[in-house]
Image (cartoon, grey):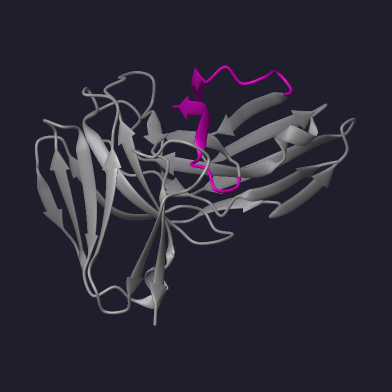
Amino acid sequence: DTEVTQTPKHLVMGMTNKKSLKCEQHMGHRAMYWYKQKAKKPPELMFVYSYEKLSINESVPSRFSPECPNSSLLNLHLHALQPEDSALYLCASSQDPVGPGWTEAFFGQGTRLTVV
Amino acid sequence: GESVGLHLPTLSVQEGDNSIINCAYSNSASDYFIWYKQESGKGPQFIIDIRSNMDKRQGQRVTVLLNKTVKHLSLQIAATQPGDSAVYFCAEKGKIYNQGGKLIFGQGTELSVKP
């Protein structure tokens, strides 16, 4: 199983709503990531979890709140978003977060988020 | 990536020709590089990787070349097929131990294959 599963695939939310994006992997990977991708642009790193602990926050606004309940799950809680936050949100995982054995990150299909 | 400005670089090739996609990376301390393929509406898909102690690696129909002197990475696709049409991103990982593998993407190149 080399899949990273993201739900939902599409999400439309109002600026006052609270919603959550979910990500799951069963590859035993110990690093998980959230990326944001705008159209025709590369993915931009938001957060990195290493062994279930937040290790990198790329100065992301607090209206985005990540959570890693266990080694297989990663959530992104959304609150009071702006229309400019509309984007494709990608989750990824990789095997070894810290050592020279680091290998490629596997990506999910993403959640297409529209903020209205 | 090596592109600047608002437009995604594009490469148009004829089916059956070879394609070469280039990427300039930024961090001389990066020790691992990956090429990803992203089709419309999908997440990035791993194609091939290379570590900084190598200068060439071959896969099935793909070859990655790494020139650390000029911080340049290239992806060669042999006998390009219509199914290869996608956006291709290079990505680099720096040596940030104990902080997870911080993978940074280049700007991407849109490959269009004409039948």
Front residue (pair B27, A35)? B27
B31, above or below A94, in the image: above
Magenta region, residue range: A39-63
Residue B1 is covered by the magenta coloring: no
Please identify the quadrant where the N terminus of chain A is shown: bottom left
Quarter of the image for residue B51 reads: top left
Q: Position of residue B103 (x, y in %)?
A: 38, 33
Q: Position of residue A92 (x, y in %)?
A: 48, 42
Q: Could you tell me which residue is drawn at 40 percent across and 77 percent down?
A: B114
Q: Could you tell me which residue is drawn at 29 percent across and 43 percent down?
A: B23
Decide if residue A71 is in sight here: no
Direction from residue A37 to residue B22 in the image, left or right: left
Count of numbered marks: 0
Q: Could you tell me which residue is drawn at 56 percent across and 44 percent down?
A: A90
Residue A43 is covered by the magenta coloring: yes
Q: Position of residue A66 (x, y in %)?
A: 63, 27
Decide if residue B45 is in sight here: yes
Outermost residue to the bottom: B115
Direction from residue B88 to residue B41 in the image, left or right: right
Front residue (pair A11, B41)? B41
Q: Could you tell me which residue is drawn at 50 percent across and 40 percent down?
A: A43
Q: Position of residue A112 (x, y in %)?
A: 68, 50
Please identify the quadrant where the C terminus of chain A is shown: top right
